[in-house]
Image: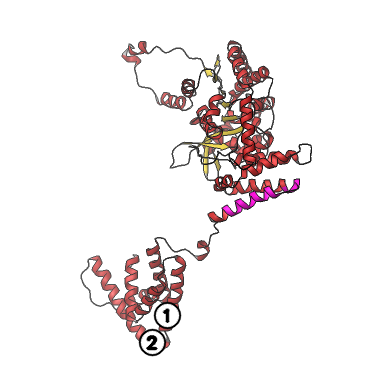
Amino acid sequence: MSSLGGQWRVIRHYLSLNNLNAEVEKLVQKLKPASPEQWDNLIRKFEKVVSARLSPGAEAEKAEADDKVKKTAVEDISSKAGSPPTSEPKPKDVAPSMAAELSVEGLLQGLRLKKDTQLGKISQPTWKEQKSAVTKSSIQSRTAYVISAVAAATSRESVLRRAERLVDHLHEFPEARDYAIKEGAVRALLRVQNKLDHAEPLAKEIYGVVNEALALVGYWRTRWGPGADILALDGGGIRGIIAIEMLRHLERLSGRRVTELFDYIAGVSTGAIIAAVLASGAGSLDTARHMYYTLSQEMFGNTSLLGGGARLVWTHAYYDTQAWERLLQDNLRDCTLTQCNRSDAPKLAIVSCVVNRGSRLAPFLFRSYEVGWRRRSVFPGTSRAPLWAAVRASAAAPTYFDEFRLDGLLHQDGGILVNNPTAVAVHEARLLFGAAAVARGALVSLGTGRALSAHTDYRRLTRALPDQQQPTSWRDKFNKILDSATDTEGVHLVMNDLFPAGGYFRFNPPLMQDCAMDEIDKAKLDNLVVDTHAYIRRNQHKFEQAAALLCRRRGVLQRVTDAARRRAILAGLAD
């Protein structure tokens, strides 16, 4: 009787002996239960029938029925087990267990199991079944109400409060984004911006919150040039100083800050640190440069060999992860990803790698935006995480720092899968700005240096002696796998072939001396800067071309088209 079918057969036999089967069948035919609530109602009615039938006057009949059911159940079990028929068991051998199974509570439990068999799930206590759930229609009603409240706000305080409520609503219910666009969220928000007088109090705060809400519904605008200008920053540990020096040179050539040159910035690992400092408004390139030298001395320089080795054994992290998190929290803004839009900064994407057990390695994007209506990225991601947590996840280099757990996902350094985020940045920018805008813009990809290596003559290798063709060691195999995983030049070759001539720039200086990701020797760090400046001098013409392309202004026809599109949205003639 361990199976549901066996228990139900015994219960039905018991009901037939007590003349209760007819009552139960009548209840089933009358109620025709199809949902858990209807089955619970049937069980309550059945309990009343059983209680009425098992009255004190029917005790003798109940005892006789119990004996018959016990015999039938025991014989049924014996025949299924293949054992030969046995003599009738003594009542004292089976009475306790069978009496317990055929009590009123046992019958009710059997009926609940029958309900589970029909509905295909296991019964749960009522408090578990009554989970709070928000229906789709309720979400849509709330979305429409919040948008109408923003449109109807009159005072500056109410506009700010209701715009923040819209942002919270879109964070709480990401599935409401498409419906918000259909309900005219973009139109309502642009009307708020259009009415703003920047000399009034709270105007700056309102403008920032509205920008954040527009980013959550996928609204975009290129701020300066004729297309979407993209910056991609590679990973590489302390060698991020190289990317900072090249960005400083672009600022000198253009006369503008990095946040004014680009519409979209994507970074991984050390590139995520630079991108977060710039796109969040936490500081400038000088701030990022100071942070790197602080990281070199305070994080990497204060770790003893004994302490680091002990941590590596017990936590798989050589450096103090908690100190690393405190350093990020102290140097980055205390804000979420989407709040970066309040400073009118470029759109930001930070790449990590999800390494949950039982799943394949997959890139994960921390975005400061959401893509437009009816568009979906192939990369999973979130826009609700704190900024420092996104950088912490992207820079969780294996054996250097602990893995980072966020919302049930386990993150490691994005560089183990996407060490050059240029292709990811192009995919996201095409979804956000459109393919035409990306084609008209400039794409700048910055590496963190590559080691000089002698040219390999494969024809000579084919003529090598047999003793020079020995199998590789385990160490060689591991290093080659690591090199292939963190390779950046393969993506560069593809981008160079796909993008039109003059629209794509890749800067990655060769290094005269190897430099580890956790280097603390100031002389070696200074050599990185020297090698970078030498590379800039040799490629000055390419830097000048990139700066000129990034400084282009939108043409007259484009500005007229933008103004007409904005007026159409404000008038409700376009989305």
Q: Earlier in the sequence, mark 2 or mark 1?
A: 1
Q: Does dot 1 land on a helix, a strand or a loop? A: helix
Q: Does dot 2 land on a helix, a strand or a loop? A: helix
Residue indicated by mark 1: 49
Q: Main secondary structure of the magenta part?
A: helix
Q: Is residue 43 above or below residue 519?
A: below
The percent coordinates of residue 10 (x first, y second) are 32, 73
Give the residue at the far left of this rendering.
Answer: 84
Query: In the rendered structure, which segment of residues is drawn in magenta?
Result: 140-158
The percent coordinates of residue 167 (x first, y second) are 64, 45
Q: Nearer the viewer, residue 180 or 329?
A: 180
Rendered image quadrant of residue 325 = top right
Residue at figure coordinates x 64%, y 28% from the top left: 559
Q: Quadrant of the C terminus?
A: top right
Q: Residue 333's mark?
A: none
Q: Residues within 10 Å of mark 1 (few under 14, many from 20)?
A: some
Q: Nearer the viewer, mark 2 or mark 1?
A: 1
Q: Nearer the viewer, residue 341 or 393?
A: 341
Q: Nearer the viewer, residue 363 or 213?
A: 213
User: Is 5 displayed left or right of 571 in the figure?
Assistant: left
The amino acid at mark 2 is Ala
The answer to whether residue 336 shows anywhere in this view is: no
Q: Quadrant of the N terminus?
A: bottom left
Is 155 covered by the magenta stretch?
Answer: yes
The percent coordinates of residue 258 (x first, y second) are 65, 25
The answer to whether residue 208 shows anywhere in this view is: yes
User: Is 329 displayed left or right of 362 in the figure?
Assistant: right
